[in-house]
Amino acid sequence: MSNEKCAIVGVGQTHFKKRRDDVSIAGLLREAIDRALEDAELTIRDIDAVVIGKAPDAFEGIVMPEIFLADAVGATNKPLLRVHTAGSVGGSTCIVGAHHVITGIHDTVLAVSWEKQSEGNAQWGLAGGRSGGIGAGGAFAPWMRAYIQESGAPDYIGWMVAVKDRRNAAKNPYAHLKMPDITLEKVKESPMLWDPIRFQESCPSSDGACAVVLTNEAGARRSSKPAAWFHALSVKSELSTFPGRNPVKPQAGVECAHDVYRQAGITTPLSEIDMAELYVPFSWYEPMWLEGHDIAGPGEGWKLVDTGATDLGGSFPVNPSGGVLSTNAIGASGMVRFAEAALQVRGLAGEHQVDGCRTALAQAYGGAANYFAMGLLRSDPPA
Amino acid sequence: MTDTAKEDLVMEHLVTLTYHERLTDNLNRFADGLLEERIIGAKCPSCGRVFVPSKGYCSLCVVPTTEADEIEVPDTGIVTGFTIVTPVAYYGQTKTEPFVYASVRLDGADSTIGGQDVTGVPQSELRAGMRVKAKWKPREERSVDGMTNRGWSGVDGVVESFEVTGEPDAPLDEYKDHLF
Amino acid sequence: MPATDIAIVGYAQTPSLRDANPSEVQLLVPTVAAAIEMAGIGRREIGFTCAGSCDYLTGGPFAFVSNLEAAGAWPPISESHVEADGAWAMYEAWMRLQEGDIDTALAFGSGKSSPSNPSEVWAQQLDPYYLAPLAPDPISLAGIQARALLDSGKATERDFAQVVANSRHNAASNPNAQLKDAGASVDALLAEPYLRNPLRKHDCPPISDGAVAVVMARGDRARSLCERPAWIRGFDHRVEAHQPGVRDIRSSSSTALAARKAGYDGGPLDVVELSSTFSPQELILLESLGLAPDGPTKVNPSGGALAGNPIMAVGLVRIVEAAARIIDGSANRALAHATSGPLLQQNLVCLLEGE
């Protein structure tokens, strides 16, 4: 018995907006699924199993919604598995889908993740249904403050990330926020949300879905388009709170990244990886994840931002799609990172394509930054 | 596929679900202590770390802790991290003004208590490392009715805020590994 | 083809309780520890962990995060979670074990149904446009299924009562069961009033709290850890269309399909453990598996879900009960079943064998 190779051969995203009142939840999922199947040149009949992921069900108010959506996602008479790992879920859903293929149990698997948070109230959901909720950013703000203090980073770094991601998003037809005229001043002057994070440094609340079609070598050869090959994938979790925990650079994030580098044979990520799609919902998480995954050394993450290295045309582009800062349907965002990394190594990212991209890193995190799902995709199959 | 000629149909489906879960024994004792102005934690019999409140187990050693492992800790401590939150309106929200959201490591405890208000200084002068003391609500106003097995702050309804004492800041190594 | 050399080598469950004192994670902590201890491995050796639970059952978004503390997730572990019964968590962990880079895995499931009203919670698992606003509770839906089964001539109310009597008898020798009665009689049961015609109260499951954990190992590792491992020879799950109106609720096509895909060839089984929570469902599931209710196969020797229904753990408990009988040598071939969604919409089958 040996493992199968696994590739992403189809990617589909919805147009992400604050409210997708034009579709039901089922319609939203089918939009992404239909695009992914079309990209893969397949039909729903070719799908052997469906893996579905989303954030807490309280965000829409439906208990285990995949149960009523079974027909809509084409899972009738097939295995249907629902993954739930908080904010990282889009990434872990893609990874669980990949395991279905790698084990050889299924040939072609549809992984889809989504959120239609306009139908519920995500702020209420994040607050556990109680007053005094701190949203998503409130929990992370103290850690961003600690990073800023410890690294000595200048205050404009967060604003730079916000501007870069929104300008990138203007080149992504599916992105939610399109702000081609955004400037550092506009970010600096936007209202404070969770000191020191301002409104324009924070992700939007989006409705949307993302779907990928995963298959083995035989399946990838069938497609007329290039595939994005998994060379590594990893999930790591740690306790969300305990004495001595470092929530700024969580150990689970370090180990997840090193597991990925080891599987892919990478020793210097900064030079051996062409670009990264990292889950950055608040501006300062870009330098924090660059350091958090040992792409940059301690205190060096913000300098990569400062020099423009993480710009679309830079030496290590981060989030050319516009990232979570431009689009955040919570359940989908982790999978969008993998989908966008796949588009990049397939050369199909259109206006936000990174030239010559052949190796891409995808990362999703969730909870109290205690859940990590990461993968490394390349244009060529593994040996 | 969207049909732009079709009328959008939206239905409102408001749902109330009621849960009555008994408070765990350890949280019951914690709640009783709070009403008496006592803060009770548990010391792990294996590693000696003190968790406030007790979880009924040490999450690092994954061993149970019992009433015999419970100890009282002082109501003074250190702000280990904080933010100022601008409130967002949503169903059930009562906050209207920016509020402090701080983690506090009580003296004698290894875990932190989250989501606390810190008073005694303007919000703009708050620092991690500041020493604080609990400002208890008057006895007749104290209530532990809001406590659940799921909440992780736990002193709400009894402690009004943690007040800055004015003592010199704690050294960095007393709070830098206790951010959350 | 999936590997057939992965086995259950350790397990533990809490008794099924009407109203447990400990919180859900407090139920899990000793249960996971006991499963690991039975397996005889160190906690740090576990290659992958998967948990199953339902936030809405526990009563809050992100509720599943607390359960991570039972997994001992420090230092960091390779871990995931499904919003489903622990049986599906075990499926994911079994799948991960196929890849050969790890040789042990942990899966667990947990849930407390006591704090909430099942009629409120599970009505929200239905189609939000057509069904949920009508708030059909699980018992009423099961009543419709029972009526359809009676009308088809496939079963009688006496058959329902026999299922219950069998459950009560079997549960009497199960220390973990909640509802037991060694002296239960079909006639006495039939004399009880209807709760939701044609269902009587005893045709329905109790409200239960509980947790369960399994440890799996591969090949020689499994043999070194357990004298008689319960080998997983087949494992599959399938889902049907959601709307009960478009399915034949008098039979369980997805159970038959999952069993076939798991490699069940219709051969003799010593034990079958089914997650039927309503007595008519046991008959429906047996028929879909081609088994007679009073045949040579022992049906729900644990008492089944009618004897204790800790939702989110109950399916994995069935697998554990079947595995226990293989491990103790009293059975050689067993089939365990888990279900999810209204009226057996989704079904999982696990085939276990002694060597």
Image (cartoon, helix red, strand yellow):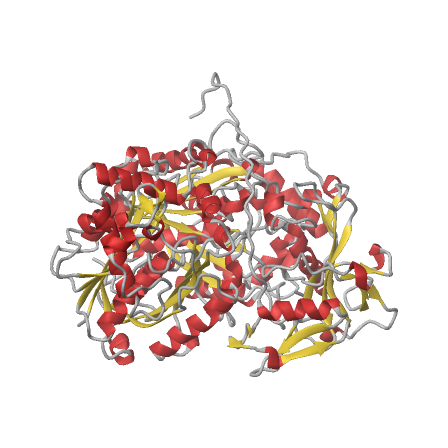
Give the camera-side residue of A184 and B77: B77
Up/down of B12 relative to A369, above or below: above
Image x and y of residue C253, in percent? 23, 43
Q: Residue at x 36, y 60 (%)?
A: C308
Image x and y of residue A72, in percent? 37, 35
Q: Residue at x 77, y 52 (%)?
A: B99
* Residue A268 appears in the figure: no
Query: Left of C144 or right of it: where is B117?
Result: right
Query: Left of A25 or right of it: where is B167?
Result: right
* Residue A278 appears in the figure: yes
Query: Left of C88 or right of it: where is A91?
Result: right
Where, by quadrant of the figure, is residue B96 drawn?
top right
User: Which image quarter is the C terminus of chain B in?
Assistant: bottom right
Image x and y of residue A189, in percent? 77, 41
Image x and y of residue C280, in percent? 26, 47
Give the camera-side residue of C218 and C192: C192
Q: Residue at x 71, y 65 (%)?
A: A150
User: Which image quarter is the N terminus of chain B in?
Assistant: top left
Q: How many numbered badges does the structure rendering display?
A: 0
Q: Return the residue found at the far top.
A: B5
